Image (tube, grey):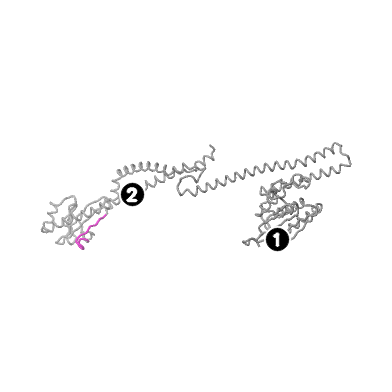
Amino acid sequence: MSQSAQKQTSKRKSLSASIYLVMLGLTLAVIFVFSLLTTGIYYFTLEDEAEDDLLELAQAAAALLDRTPSEENISILENQLSDQVRYTLIDADGTVLYDSAGEASSMESHADRPEFQSALESGAGVISRYSDTAETVTVYAAIELEDGSIIRLAETRETLLTYASGLIVPETISFALAAVAVLIVSRILTRRIVQPIDELDVAEPLDNEVYAEMEPMLQRIDQQQRLLKEQNKELARTESMRREFSANVSHEMKTPLQVISGYAELMKTGVVDPADVPRFAGLIYDESQAMRQLINDVLTLSRLDETAFVREPMPVDMMVVSERVVGRLNSFAETRGVSLSLTGENAVIKGTEALAEEAIFNLAENGIRYNQPGGNVSIDVRYEFDINDFRFVLVHVKDDGPGIPEGEQQKVFERFYRMEKSRSKETGGTGLGLAIAKHAAQHHRGTLTLESEVGAGTTFILRIPAAEM
């Protein structure tokens, strides 16, 4: 495999791998976040319950102390109450009278403690305080006694971080088990999701049962395939036409070459009477001119086929072009005994002037060539508006020749087509003029049609969009 192919392969992404990784990553992220939220919710729920329990215990202790004389409170605290919770008895002025966790006499006043003030104000208070040094949270529940003193209970609790760290091992195990389960489920789901795509029949895109989101893509593929099939048919047709064209060109050039070669050989060998040399030379000249015209027409058609005339459109006055055509064909019309006339108005298109002139020239020359002595060929140029007020330039080339049978009217635009093969030598021409005119019309986004009746002549109608005013 080449280096460029390896680079292209490395850039390709696998859809199944992408879906698999996204599902796996998303699921694991959800599990992780859910674990954090669950841990936090569970922790704060336990803390709320602990505060409620501590407050109830403080209320029970206060009830017990209120039933005994005040001077016996310390004795009861020392002997009867559990040592799992810290008990502190505070005088109404904030002096610590007793503390189960330390020496009361050495303790500072608690008058500024939040739980002490809350108990004095409302009779009870629950406060949580975080200790930076011990990195623990202490919950305080304080109740005011009937003699005005405060009984305070304190319980040390774990912080959220400490609590969560204690769950690392079980949560890690749970997370690992969940990850394994997600791996399996994600792979199964990925296969099921990708399966319709793997089973796509690209040859018949619209016959597949796939996700609705894929239908536009499959429709596009179907359109592209239809277009490619049409293009392949067109290429095959073009190739067939090219081969036929080449064969026709070879055939058409063979005849004048044989004539030229034959007469030239006779003159070379000296078997021709000197009086006949001018006649033979004239025949050679005529055949060479016919070959020259054939080559010119073939080159014109080749350039049209290869869009060699594509260039910036320029304004072209079809009346001026027609005047030049009449000037070029006057001599030819006189030799044929045909009159040539031009009528109409100045009408402008946007296109290629040389190609427009070639089209009108071929139509007029065809009318003269296949006319009869004393016949007429007229060219008429004018504007025309269609039903949508879109403006066209119309060029009518009319002759009063023998006309074209209805079954042959479309064939005359084919290359090298002649209605009367026997007259081809007599009338001359290459059989390419009308094909060139048809191509020229299409090049200018126009049309070339004809109206004809046997014995009543033929009218060719060149219709091209007019230039914008």
Disc 2/disc 1 C-alpha distance (Å): 83 Å
Categorize mark 1 by other alpha carbons within 10 Å: few (<14), some (14-19), many (20+). some
State the image coordinates of residue 67 (x, y, percent, origin top left).
Answer: 11, 58
Q: In this rendering, would 449 be left or right of 221?
A: right
Q: Residue at x 67, y 43 (%)?
A: 242
Categorize mark 2 by other alpha carbons within 10 Å: few (<14), some (14-19), many (20+). few
Residue on which the image places disc 1: 382
The answer to whether any part of residue 92 appears in the image is yes
Q: Secondary structure at mark 2?
A: helix
Q: Secondary structure at mark 1?
A: strand
Q: Residue 127: within the magenta?
A: yes
Q: Residue 380: within the magenta?
A: no
Q: From the viewer's perspective, is the residue at label 2 or at label 1 nearer?
A: 1
> Which amino acid, by three-letter code, is at mark 2?
Phe
State the image coordinates of residue 1 (x, y, percent, origin top left).
Answer: 53, 37
Q: Residue at x 75, y 42 (%)?
A: 253
The answer to whether any part of residue 303 appears in the image is no
**Viewer-side residue, 411 vs 172:** 411
Residue on which the image places disc 2: 34
Q: Residue at x 87, y 42 (%)?
A: 276
What residue span does the magenta drawing correspond to? Answer: 118-129
> Which amino acid, by three-letter code, is at mark 1?
Arg
Q: Residue at x 81, y 38 (%)?
A: 262
